[in-house]
């Protein structure tokens, strides 16, 4: 990999990830270290801030970087901003171009995680009428290798925490504040020796993983909780549903899921932009299926892997090439 080394003369501590050379902030590309805000803006700004997490995948054969489902991520960013009563100073087309410009400036030539972040600017306490403040956006694009080659399934637990619900903090907005809920779940899971946590909603039904949607397969049927179950409306979820139905000819049921269905499922996996397709091999120490990565999960994961790297002609419409028409 991948990114041009930062020209900034900095000591990098072991384990510290070197930032890319440039960031996009407030309408232009600028050196990473120049993108500063006043320290007081850190506090209440976060309450209403919303963001996106987008992956771009490197295709070694074509020397091409493909952004996966950029348009869908922009649409969700707009929905998240709307829910926070934010209006963007930039159009979604301007932000799409900003992302391309940023990746090109950083000479990105490897798997990349892109994150636009929108917040009410100004260091006024955010619990006051923050919706009247101007909105600002910055975008980062950092090197982040895919996990799709990892051949280990995750051991999950059902969390003792409950998923936030629509009348509390709308889960369909990708709001920073919502991630306190996710963080409590993943921290509890890790402290108790699991790889990831699964959250039940206020009705006691399965909602999702801490940072990913959830699917199970039982008797050849694919099942996932509906978008009204207190989930983030995952773009990977939507992608995977389409792949199951159109490419693999399987039935997908979007319906309420009981906790114990996870224990008796043949296969379970988590999916999200960052998580990609993460096979689950046990839940609360109940072995899922054979305790190994399931056949259908492997199949859909392989298909996903080929699609995101631009190897499936019929799905190129989901990809935005970075290195063209410069
Ligand atoms: N739920 C939560 C809480 C998440 O953070 C994510 C990751 N964005 C997802 C689901 C999956 O969404 P997506 O597939 O759009 O990344």
Image (tube, rainbow, N blue to C red):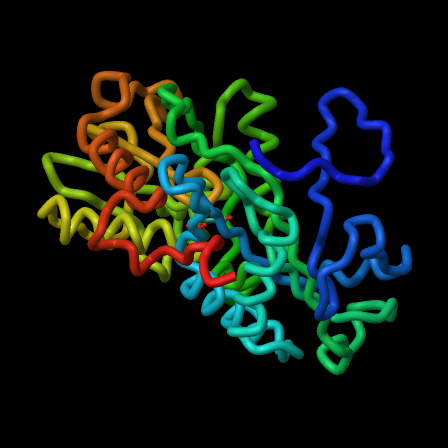
In the depicted structure, whether residue 302 falls above or below residue 107? above
Where residue 192 sits in the image (x, y, percent)? 56, 21
In the depicted structure, whether residue 142 falls above or below residue 17? below
- Residue at 72% x, 40% y is 19
Q: Please state if 63 lies on the left or on the right of 226 as rendered.
A: right
Q: Nearer the viewer, residue 95 or 88?
A: 95
- Residue at 47% x, 47% y is 56
- Residue at 19% x, 43% y is 222
Where residue 27 sits in the image (x, y, percent)? 71, 70
Image quarter of the N terminus: top right
Q: Nearer the viewer, residue 92 or 5?
A: 5
Numbered-mark total: 0
Q: Nearer the viewer, residue 251 or 137?
A: 137
Using the rendered view, name the quadrant where residue 41 is placed: bottom right
Where residue 102 sits in the image (x, y, percent)? 63, 56
In the depicted structure, whether residue 150 falls above or below residue 52? above
Extreme residue in the bottom direction: 132
Where residue 24 sits in the image (x, y, percent)? 69, 60
- Residue at 79% x, 52% y is 31
Q: Please state if 319 lies on the left or on the right of 243 as rendered.
A: right
């Amino acid at each position: 990999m991948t990114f041009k080394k930062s020209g900034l003369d900095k000591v990098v501590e072991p384990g510290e990830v070197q930032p890319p050379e440039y960031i996009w902030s407030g309408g232009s590309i600028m050196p990473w270290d120049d993108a500063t805000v006043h320290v007081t803006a850190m506090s209440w700004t976060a309450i209403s801030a919303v963001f996106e997490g987008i992956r771009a995948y490197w295709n070694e054969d074509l020397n091409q970087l493909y952004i996966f489902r950029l348009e869908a991520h922009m649409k969700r960013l707009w929905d998240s901003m709307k829910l926070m009563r934010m209006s963007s100073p930039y159009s979604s087309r301007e932000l799409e171009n900003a992302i391309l410009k940023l990746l090109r400036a950083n000479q990105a030539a490897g798997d990349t995680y892109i994150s636009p972040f929108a917040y009410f600017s100004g260091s006024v306490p955010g619990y006051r009428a923050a919706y009247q403040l101007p909105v600002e956006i910055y975008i980062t694009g950092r090197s982040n290798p895919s996990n799709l080659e990892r051949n280990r399934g995750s051991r999950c637990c059902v969390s003792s925490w409950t998923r936030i619900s629509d009348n509390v903090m709308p889960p369909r907005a990708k709001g920073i504040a919502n991630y306190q809920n996710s963080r409590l779940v993943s921290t509890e899971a890790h402290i108790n020796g699991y790889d990831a946590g699964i959250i039940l909603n206020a009705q006691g039904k399965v909602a999702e993983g801490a940072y990913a949607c959830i699917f199970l397969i039982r008797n050849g049927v694919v099942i996932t909780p509906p978008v009204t179950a207190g989930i983030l409306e995952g773009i990977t979820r939507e992608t995977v549903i389409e792949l199951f139905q159109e490419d693999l000819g399987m039935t997908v049921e979007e319906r309420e899921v009981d906790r114990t269905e996870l224990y008796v499922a043949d296969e379970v996996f988590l999916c999200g932009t960052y998580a990609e397709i993460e096979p689950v091999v046990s839940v609360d120490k109940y072995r899922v299926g054979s305790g190994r990565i399931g056949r259908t999960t492997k199949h859909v994961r392989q298909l996903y892997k080929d699609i995101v790297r631009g190897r499936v002609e019929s799905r190129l419409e989901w990809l935005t090439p970075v290195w063209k028409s410069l």
